[in-house]
Image: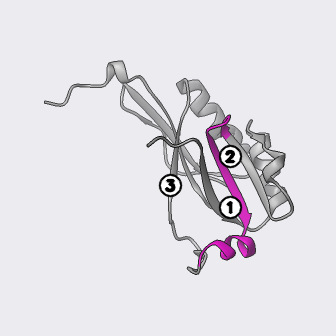
Amino acid sequence: MEINQIFVNLPVKDIQQTKKFWKAIGFTINEKFSDEKSVCVVMKEDLINVMFLTEEYFKTFSERPVPKGDTTQVLISIALNSREEVDQIVSTAVENGASQHEEPQDYGWMYQNSFWDINGHGWNVMFADVSQMPSQH
């Protein structure tokens, strides 16, 4: 079995602010899947998308309650092509209303930085050079 596309669905309070935030940090919007109740952020063309849905609309997909307050349901990790891209996206996210999640971590072969987006969702952003990964014996 092979997956054709991935759509991650996350609840948000304000669609327009969410759309503005993700465009500001460099992602495109798939307008076909976006309306007043949702915005589709393209993470990787034709493969990975994040659907940000108003809390009311999100509730129509599950009988479980939308987490409130400072709970964490999921942390999303994305890999980029360089350490510079990692820091750039985190810096741009913070400049546009996100907050730093933790200090950057440098493992030599892997580098990661992270932020909480304007809706409180956690994003770990990383770069890894697998050829430099230590062998595990």
The disc placed on residue 75 is 3
Q: Which residues are magenta?
A: 43-62
Amino acid at pointer 2: Val
Alpha carbons under labels 3 and 2: distance apart: 17 Å
Amino acid at pointer 1: Asn
Alpha carbons under labels 1 and 3: distance apart: 13 Å
Quadrant of the snapshot with the C terminus:
top left
Mark 2 or 1: the one toward you: 1
> Is 57 colored magenta in this rendering?
yes
Image quarter of residue 110: top left
Instruction: Tell me whether the residue at label 1 lies in contact with that at label 3, contact meaning CB atoms closer than 8 angstroms.
Output: no
Give above or below for 114 relative to 131: below
Amino acid at pointer 3: Leu
Which residue corresponds to the image point at 64% horizontal and 72% vertical from the top-left? 61
The disc placed on residue 94 is 2
The disc placed on residue 119 is 1
Q: Secondary structure at mark 3?
A: strand
Instruction: Tell me whether the residue at label 3 lies in contact with that at label 2, contact meaning CB atoms closer than 8 angstroms.
Output: no
Q: Secondary structure at mark 1?
A: loop
Q: Residue 135 location, x and y as percent?
A: 21, 25
Which residue corresponds to the image point at 73% horizontal and 52% vertical from the top-left? 97
